[in-house]
Amino acid sequence: MISSSRATVTRFAPSPTGRLHLGHAYSAMLAHDFARERGGRFLLRIEDIDPGRTREEHVRGIEEDLDWLGLRWDEPPVRQSARLPRYDAALERLKALGLVYPCFCTRAEIAASAVAPHGNEGPLYPGTCRALPPTERAQRLAADAHCWRLDMHAASARAGALQWRDAAAGTVIAEPETLGDVVLARKDAPTSYHLAVTVDDAAQGVTDIVRGVDLFAATHVHRLLQALLGLPTPDYHHHPLLTAPDGSRLAKRAGSPALAEYRKAGMDPGTLLAALRRGTPLPPPPGRPT
Ligand code: GLU
């Protein structure tokens, strides 16, 4: 891990779209322990910007599960849904720099013309709306649903060469262009994961971002947004993802057991955390098929 003289601040930033599972517990534990070992602060941020998938019961569930595990956060949890004006201000700044454009494409249109899928970022946007004539753009802005995309080429050119420090990968040269013109404000929400997370990590003074390696690619974009918005760059600690005994990834969608199931089955949270800290695979809660 990278050593630093700054007062350490880490965060756990789940999206309340389902119950937490072991993979979340592992990530939260690493972020929590990293802060505690350095006398720093551990924050909880609820990333509830997705209006279609956010559920209040899951917000409560996240707090209950962390509480059960004994992973205490230091300040009242921040909710992204309460911070929309901040994201809007950042977007306006990028608009003023001429680095974003409205995109009217539907998912189906993008899928039909997309270049190639890129990790868990989805298909690369082919740039259709970047080249719209100004009059057509103005007309459609008033009439049609749209998201806002970063003009990645222009943004990268403006920011110049960038890098960040990663505990596992060392000094990483930022290559945000490999992700294409990412969305900064969605059609159905006035921001996006990339913009909100970058604005909030800076606003909350997060010094060390401990999160799964599945978000490594996104860091290229976050580093670029930091440069464009004049925000500090934290150190990154992308950790390997916890896998099931058969090597498959532990994800909600794959039906991996929720922490709540372990709790209901009477599992001692200290034992569960100790197993996560040792990296010992956990059997499914009693009553579940292996
Ligand atoms: N909200 C994101 C998720 O649940 C994680 C954000 C982050 O750690 O940067 O996948």
Image: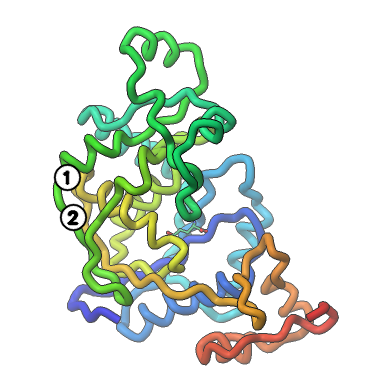
Q: Amino acid at mark 1?
A: Ala
Dot 2 corresponds to which residue?
162
Task: Report the residue at 47% width, 55% height from top.
Answer: 119
Left or right of 211 in this view: 242: right
Task: Report the residue at 27% width, 29% height from top.
Answer: 95
Label 1, ligand 1: CB separation under 8 Å = no
Could you say where residue 62 lies in the image, as x and y percent from the top left? 60, 64
Is mark 1 in CB contact (under 8 Å) with mark 2?
A: yes
Task: Report the residue at 28% width, 61% height from top.
Answer: 205
For marks 1 and 2, give the CA distance. 7 Å
Could you say where residue 114 lies in the image, as x and y percent from the top left? 48, 36
Label 2, ligand 1: CB separation under 8 Å = no
The colour scheme of the drawn protein is: rainbow
Could you say where residue 177 lies in the image, as x and y percent from the top left? 30, 45
Q: Dividing the picture into quarters, in which one does residue 138 lie? A: top left
Tag on residue 159?
A: 1
Tag on residue 120?
A: none
Left or right of 243 in this view: 154: left
Left or right of 28 in this view: 94: left
Q: Amino acid at mark 2?
A: Leu
Q: Nearer the viewer, residue 233 or 39?
A: 233
Report the number of numbered marks.
2
* In the rendered image, the vertical position of residue 49 relative to residue 78, given as above or below: above
Question: For the residue carrying disc 2, how many other residues have a C-alpha within 10 Å: few (<14), some (14-19), or many (20+)?
Answer: some
Q: Nearer the viewer, residue 75 or 115?
A: 115
Task: Name the outermost residue toward the right.
Answer: 287
